[in-house]
Image (cartoon, rainbow, N blue to C red):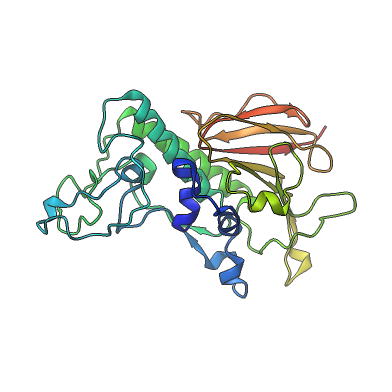
Amino acid sequence: MDTGGSSYIQQGGDGGTLAEFATRLCGSDDLFASRGPHATVNFVTAHDGFTLADLVSFNEKHNEANGENNRDGNDTNYSWNHGVEGPTEDVDIAAARLRSIRALLGTLLLSTGTPMLLMGDEMGRSQLGNNNAYNQDNETSWLDWSLSPEAASLLRWTTSLLNIRRAHPALRQVEFFDGRPVGDGRPQDLAWLRPDGTAMTDADWNDPTCDVVVMFLSGELFSRGDPAQNQRDAAFLITFNRGESESWLTLPQTPYGARYRRLLDTAAHEPASAPFTDPSGSQVSLEPRSVALFRVEWD
């Protein structure tokens, strides 16, 4: 996932990046059309640069310990500290940072393509703002396996997300979407919807204030090379709210689905699935800077 994609969720997002964000979510067919979505490697962080925890905790690099007067390492980190630089005892800021981490993980692992996850990000490892810890053979670069309650919770959340991705081929497409209907009276293999449950327009795509976008996956997996390899999985809604305020989603009606079960929500501290379904046409809340995954169900 390029930095344009990750910054769409961070700090309200960058205006004018929605179409770019959607392209990356779908596997970057503008770059890999001849190779397939498996060829794109999506990532938010790598071994060089901030860890995921530091990406939401520091606005600036802090590489003084490297002995180069903080001149080393990249100065452009696309990060946001949520109002305080570095570690804080403010429980609200700490909670907001964890929500942003979960939203970035959700964006990464629900995107089409090959995900790359920096080891330690799944448990919130920090290098205290050092984005170039090449000569730090100490606690700065070591991985601490004694998990705090917050780290253990994040690990459970990441594990649940990975398990859902593994279980559902619709969340790891091997062919690019082509926008065709999957059958008579049925929706396209991929559709983009507004918060009111209707199809997005050109004006929506070009609206820099658009904070909520909804991605519908039909669950039909087409094999262009061999139609006998076509598969059918569950259908899903994936919602992205980059805004600073709660938003409301009208669950789309026929032909998209009859009922919807919220499987994951990055605004939730734990990854429990909702024990109930909401009927199409009803409204559900989308928390600020959140990603939510709904499974489509039929009566």
Q: Quadrant of the C terminus?
A: top right
185 displayed left or right of 258: right
Q: Position of residue 6 (x, y in %)?
A: 47, 50
Q: Residue at x 61, y 51 (%)?
A: 171
78 displayed left or right of 279: left
Compared to residue 60, the image places residue 259 above or below, namely: above
Q: Residue at x 53, y 41 (%)?
A: 242
Q: Residue at x 80, y 34 (%)?
A: 258
| Count of all numbered marks drawn on residues in the image | 0
276 displayed left or right of 94: right
Q: As drawn, which residue projects farthest toward the left?
A: 67
Q: Nearer the viewer, residue 141 or 13?
A: 13
Q: Nearer the viewer, residue 256 or 223?
A: 256
Q: Residue at x 82, y 56 (%)?
A: 181
Q: Position of residue 102 (x, y in %)?
A: 46, 39
Q: Quadrant of residue 273?
A: top right
Q: Position of residue 19 (x, y in %)?
A: 60, 56
